Amino acid sequence: MKKALITGITGQDGSYLAEFLLEKGYEVHGIKRRASSFNTSRIDHIYQDPHVTNPKLHLHYGDLTDTSNLTRILAEVKPDEVYNLGAMSHVAVSFESPEYTADVDAIGTLRLLEAIRFLGLEKKTRFYQASTSELYGLVQETPQKETTPFYPRSPYAVAKMYAYWITVNYREAYGMYACNGILFNHESPRRGETFVTRKITRALANIAQGLEPCLYLGNMDSLRDWGHARDYVKMQWLMLQQEQPEDFVIATGVQYSVRQFVEFAAKELGITLRFEGSGVDEKGYVAAVSGDNAPGAKVGDLIVAVDPRYFRPSEVETLLGDPTKAKEKLGWVPETTLQTMVEEMVRSDLAESKKHVLLKSHGFDVSLSLE
Ligand code: NDP
Ligand code: GDR
């Protein structure tokens, strides 16, 4: 039985990857951070009581900023595969906490690689690094592929660039099986609530149910290549099953704007939007027609507005991936279309909103504030 160690197991990708590896028969170990309240909601459904015989899922307290802790866990588990998914992963927040982001995302990766080498596991343990399309930043070529030059545009992306190259360096210097998945944006109902797609589906579902008045967004013209996290974690695993370690771009090859994502999600909820204002005096969208799903959205209400607070000091305006290499060598075919994913995310958030309406109607007032 193979053993895998996942950093970031409590995150979106970590939860899908853990499910996937358990189904493949792996013994899965995950590193979770100590928090003052429970932070395992994404993996609670696969949790196994450590008191049962031969549990297949094991959680270890740890942190990517703590070398001795990482070394001890690696020495104890001796994994066949390490998936380094743990990160301070929010681009906008990295401008607020640049030093912490570098410590976790850049030096955290070095700490893991060096611990593998120090323990003499470099010929046994295969290493996956969660690299990102943010490396392309101010794009030098469209679409972006494995050979496209990097131009990072945030403390997050600069930290991830260090992690990318230190992974390549350990492969070349020590013959480690280490590779980078350069993954474009991928989403799901488990996406963190402050990333733009989930923020949109969650807020529009709440607006549709009359639970909040307006969704405030930053740059709605930004273009992204969005896929589904469930599809992408399979590629993370496949990259570690090849004969030779290589780096791969994983993307859909299709691009949409944040604005289009808003329109798709609204349509799914039966709300028709009308754009108000133009250019510099852009206001956002008012509800033009609201449907059966959206008893709370009143025609004429401003329900999506621009708030410059969400603009970034330096923005990545456009990203579009070319996944040809992954298609040829890994047999990559994106299984989920954007439309299907929007539908899945809206359905999940609408169910949550309806639950809150029901609670409220029975006297409970649940706070639904959004950052
Ligand atoms: P999430 O933000 O959902 O999850 C990040 C995980 O990292 C969480 O489990 C978090 O723990 C953990 N973490 C944060 N800080 C630390 C730390 N100091 N020590 C240990 N663990 C820590 O991210 P995703 O699942 O979306 O992404 C997974 C990885 O892939 C990340 O590295 C991200 O940068 C990268 N990536 C993501 C893409 C995407 O579109 N989703 C695209 C390309 C790359 P906690 O739950 O306690 O916060
Ligand atoms: P990104 O994702 O920065 O691409 O990083 P995010 O969803 O945060 O932003 C995508 C685009 O939407 C614009 N935007 C907003 N973004 C947020 N979060 N909130 C808003 O209100 C808002 N309004 C507009 C942003 O400016 C941006 O252009 C994600 C993360 O998962 C990274 O960890 C990962 O590496 C990359 O995807 C690939």
Image (spheres, helix red, strand yellow):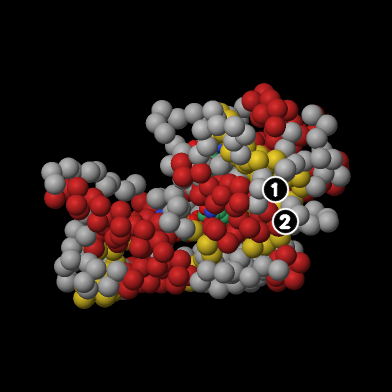
For marks 2 and 1, the one nearer the N-term is 1
Q: Which mark is residue 239?
A: 2
* Amino acid at dot 2: Met
Front-lying residue, 128 or 255: 128
Residue position marked by numbered label 1 in the rendering: 128
Quadrant assignment for ligand 1: top right
Can residue 217 be seen in this snapshot? no
The residue located at (29%, 69%) in the rendering is: 269
Residue 84 in percent (x, y) is at 64, 43
User: Which image quadrant is residue 234 in?
Assistant: bottom right
- Residue 291 appears in view: yes
**Residue at coordinates 72% horizontally, 65% vertically from top-left?**
330
Q: Residue at x 56, y 42 (%)?
A: 9
Dot 1 alpha-carbon crowd within 10 angstroms: few under 14, some 14 to 19, many 20 or more: many
Callout 1, which amino acid?
Answer: Tyr
SS for callout 1: strand
From the top left corner, tell me how far across and down residue 281 is, in percent: 29, 68
Residue 265: image location, x then y, percent: 36, 68
- Where disc 2 sits, the SS reads helix
Q: CA distance from mark 2 to mark 1?
A: 8 Å
Tag count = 2
Disc 2 to disc 1: CB gap under 8 Å? yes
Q: Quadrant of residue 274?
A: bottom left
The answer to whether 262 appears left or right of 88 in the picture is: left
Q: Residue at x 23, y 50 (%)?
A: 356
In the displayed orientation, state which residue is furthest to the front. 53
Residue 305: percent from left, percent from top: 29, 62
